[in-house]
Image: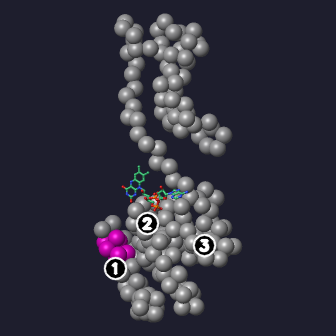
Amino acid sequence: MSLLGPVYDLPTTMAKFVGLGIPLGDVVAMVTSRAAALIGRSDDLGSLAIGREADVSVLRFGTIHRNIFLDIPTLCDPYLRDRTRTGLHYAGQICGVEGYVESIMSAIIVAMSITAASQMREMPPLPKETMIGSLMNYVHTPRKNFQPMNANFGLLPTNGTGGRRSRQTRHEDSANAALGAMESYRRDNAWLFA
Ligand SMILES: Cc1cc2nc3c(=O)[nH]c(=O)nc-3n(C[C@H](O)[C@H](O)[C@H](O)COP(=O)(O)OP(=O)(O)OC[C@H]3O[C@@H](n4cnc5c(N)ncnc54)[C@H](O)[C@@H]3O)c2cc1C
């Protein structure tokens, strides 16, 4: 259970066993009654029977947030087109983005690149000042432990520069820079939006 990373804690380890398909009741027994029996302490540990010492953890059983994603920098060009299979595009969280809006953004890029291709042209890269441009830049940058990414201000190149500013001011400046960059992009590439 720890071959590819840290064990973290007991609930995480239990969740891994549940994920492997072992019924929850069996997993609970594995870490309570069976563990107590194994060390010869069934008389005082591993059970909630009357008279026993109470040592209780209350856990909420939820859903494991599972996100399957591809090695997009290797597999695709910057417009989410498969490098080897012409006409095959990827969109949604399988591209390494996470969230509703982010998934829609990736589909917009696919739609724009198909529009460009239908006019025998190449879609110019989206400005990095915009969230959609930054997120795609993140997705296309090869990294050792790639993990899916949400839209967030930390991705924007304009967010950390320009002296000491409050968080709100930095975010407003980033939003204005993004709007300006997108407006220029639309103006310079009107054919793509016709
Ligand atoms: C519990 C949970 C909570 C979340 N909360 C939020 C939130 O609050 N805000 C937010 O922005 N994001 C949230 N997300 C993330 C968000 O749901 C996803 O990032 C987003 O839905 C991904 O969209 P998608 O279209 O790429 O994939 P999906 O929405 O997963 O759509 C993929 C579709 O493909 C279908 N499919 C799969 N395999 C096949 C097949 N072989 N043949 C045909 N169809 C197939 C599936 O049934 C599914 O309908 C949450 C995710 C989870 C799991």
As helix, strand or loop, the secondary structure at mark 3 comes to loop
> Mark 2 near ligand 1 (CB under 8 Å)?
yes
Question: Comparing marks 2 and 3, which lies closer to the viewer?
Answer: 3
- With respect to residue 153, does 190 lie above or below? below
From which residue to which does the magenta span run?
169-175
Question: Residue 138 location, x and y as percent?
Answer: 53, 68
Does residue 170 belong to the magenta stretch? yes
Residue named by callout 2: 102
Instruction: Name the residue beneath numbered marker 1.
Output: 176
Q: Nearer the viewer, residue 172 or 27?
A: 27
> Which residue was labeled with disc 3?
88
Percent position of residue 154, x then y: 44, 66
Instruction: Name which quarter of the figure residue 58 lies in.
Output: top left
Pair 3/1: label in front: 3
User: Looking at this view, is 27 or 50 the one in front?
Assistant: 27
Residue under the image location 59 percent in, 14 percent down:
38
Question: How far separated are the C-alphas under marks 2 and 3?
Answer: 20 Å
